[in-house]
Image (cartoon, helix red, strand yellow):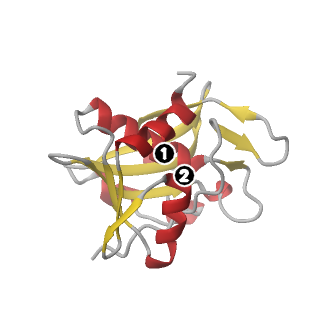
């Protein structure tokens, strides 16, 4: 049963931004490794079981890291390339990037922008779909340019995808 995603777009930044200093850091998105999974546990504060995600052959799991700091994972994303869009199964900021005392803002927006970029690369015109928690539908419309397709299904189409990609990846 899909309960819906409940990530909050804290801020649309140009990369990720240190909350205290305001400094921006360029990011990289790469495929997660089994080695990474040793640190991504509920005991370490992660909410979702990412091992379950990585074991599903149709899904791709990616990690967001800061350029030149590949060992500290800032956030994770699980998605699946479908016939006409990319479907986002799970997204999670690292435990230290959540709540009032988080280190970096911009992690969820960065991961969604990457999913849109991947959608273009795989021939899906930037189209991205995900199921939202009902109370966050308006939030995603306002922050991501997503539209409410029906039920709790949210869609990001080409134009909104291009805006997100331009914001996060114009320097890459």
* Location of residue 165 in the rendering, given as x and y in whole percent from the top left corner: 48, 35
Q: Is residue 20 above or below residue 1?
A: above
For the residue pair 105 and 156, the one nearer the viewer reads as: 156
Query: Image check: 27 left or right of 52?
Result: right
* Location of residue 67 in the rendering, given as x and y in whole percent from the top left corner: 60, 27
Tell me the residue at 26%/53% (across/down): 55
Label 1 element class? helix
Q: Quadrant of residue 130?
A: bottom left
For the residue pair 120 and 158, the one nearer the viewer reads as: 158
Answer yes or no: is residue 42 visible: yes
Farthest left residue in view: 83
Farthest right residue in view: 21
Residue ID for mark 1: 111
Label 2 element class? helix
Task: Decide: few, some or many residues near mark 1? Use Cα within 10 Å; few <14, some 14-19, many ≥20.
Answer: many
The quadrant of the rendering that contains the N terminus is bottom left
How far apart marks 2 and 1 lie (CA) works out to 5 Å
Q: Is residue 7 above or below residue 20?
A: below
Query: Image check: 167 left or right of 125?
Result: right
Residue ID for mark 2: 108
Q: Any mark on residue 163, and which?
A: none
* Location of residue 115 in the rendering, given as x and y in whole percent from the top left corner: 39, 43
Task: Decide: few, some or many residues near mark 2? Use Cα within 10 Å; few <14, some 14-19, many ≥20.
Answer: many
Query: Image check: 2 left or right of 44?
Result: left
Q: Quadrant of residue 101?
A: bottom right
Q: Across the whole image, how many numbered discs are drawn on residues?
A: 2
* Location of residue 19 in the rendering, given as x and y in whole percent from the top left corner: 78, 48
Tell me the residue at 26%/49% (across/down): 80
Farthest top residue in view: 172
Tell me the residue at 65%/57% (across/down): 10
Tell me the residue at 54%/48% (across/down): 109
Q: Are marks 2 and 1 in contact (CB under 8 Å)?
A: yes
């Amino acid at each position: 049963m899909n309960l819906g995603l409940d990530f909050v777009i804290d801020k649309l930044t140009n990369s990720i931004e240190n909350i205290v200093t305001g400094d921006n850091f360029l990011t990289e998105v790469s495929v997660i490794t089994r080695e990474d999974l040793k640190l991504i546990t509920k005991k370490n504060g992660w909410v979702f079981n990412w091992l379950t995600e990585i074991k599903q052959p149709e899904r791709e799991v990616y990690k967001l890291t800061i350029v030149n700091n590949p060992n500290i994972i800032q956030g994770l994303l699980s998605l699946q390339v479908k016939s006409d869009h990319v479907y986002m199964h799970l997204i999670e900021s690292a435990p230290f990037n959540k709540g009032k005392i988080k280190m970096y803002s911009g992690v969820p927006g960065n991961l969604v922008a990457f999913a849109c970029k991947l959608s273009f690369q795989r021939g899906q015109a930037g189209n991205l779909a995900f199921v939202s928690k009902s109370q966050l539908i308006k939030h995603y419309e306002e922050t991501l340019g997503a539209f409410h397709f029906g039920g709790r299904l949210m869609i990001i189409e080409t134009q909104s995808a291009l805006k997100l990609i331009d914001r996060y990846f114009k320097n890459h």
